[in-house]
Image (tube, rainbow, N blue to C red):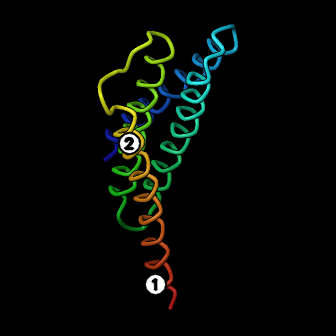
Amino acid sequence: MARSAYALTALASCAGAAGVMESAIAARGHGQPLLFTSAHFLLINAAASIALNAFGTNAPSGRHWFLVAAFILLGGAILFCADLSVRALAGHRLFPFAAPIGGTLMIIGWVMAAVCALCCLIGWRQQRS
């Protein structure tokens, strides 16, 4: 699991850096609302992926599910944001349905993270009883 966790952190860090760069590009004159949206989604979901990675590392059980949720979340964010960025900068789509697929993956990743946390909470409560 350690290699996957390091790979996730590296990928999320690159997504965060891309979000900062997109913010700078958007602020310097492009003014495209899609770039601002893409930058915000990248930054938020990159940070959330790193946090899920940390939770998974310290989870009493189901550690790999936190990592899976983080990869799904981050993959969806990258796909969604890539489509928004290509639309803003090149004027066309990445491929048909790229943004809806990416958005759906983000939703799945967030829901999966909630389920993982609730499962750990239930397990923790049962151990204390």
Task: Establish if 47 lies above or below 111.
Answer: above
- Please give left or right for residue 41 compared with residue 109 in the image: right
Which one is earlier in the sequence, the residue at label 2 or at label 1? 2
> Among all residues in the image, which is located at the extreme bottom?
129
Which of the labelled discs sits on residue 65, or is there none?
A: none
Say what amino acid the circle numbered 2 marks.
Answer: Ala
At 48% from the left and 43% from the top, the residue drawn is: 49
- Please give left or right for residue 39 compared with residue 49 in the image: right
Residue 33 location (% of width, % of height): 62, 23
Say what amino acid the circle numbered 1 marks.
Answer: Gln
Q: Secondary structure at mark 2?
A: helix
- Please give left or right for residue 71 compared with residue 45 in the image: left
Along the viewing direction, whichever of 90 and 11 lies nearer the viewer: 90
Q: Mark 1 packing: few (<14 Cα in 10 Å), some, or many (20+)? A: few
Task: Establish if 112 lies above or below 71.
Answer: below
At 37% from the left and 67% from the top, the residue drawn is: 61
Residue 74: image quadrant is top left
At 44% from the left and 36% from the top, the residue drawn is: 77
Residue 90 location (% of width, % of height): 44, 9
Q: Secondary structure at mark 1?
A: helix
Residue occupied by mark 1: 127
Residue 92 location (% of width, % of height): 39, 15
Residue 68 location (% of width, % of height): 33, 50
Are the residues at dot 2 and dot 1 in contact (C-beta closer than 8 Å)? no
Which of the labelled discs sits on residue 5, or is there none?
A: 2
Along the viewing direction, whichever of 87 and 119 lies nearer the viewer: 87
The mark total stands at 2
Q: CA distance from mark 2 to mark 1?
A: 27 Å
Q: Mark 2 packing: few (<14 Cα in 10 Å), some, or many (20+)? A: many
Residue 101: image quadrant is top left
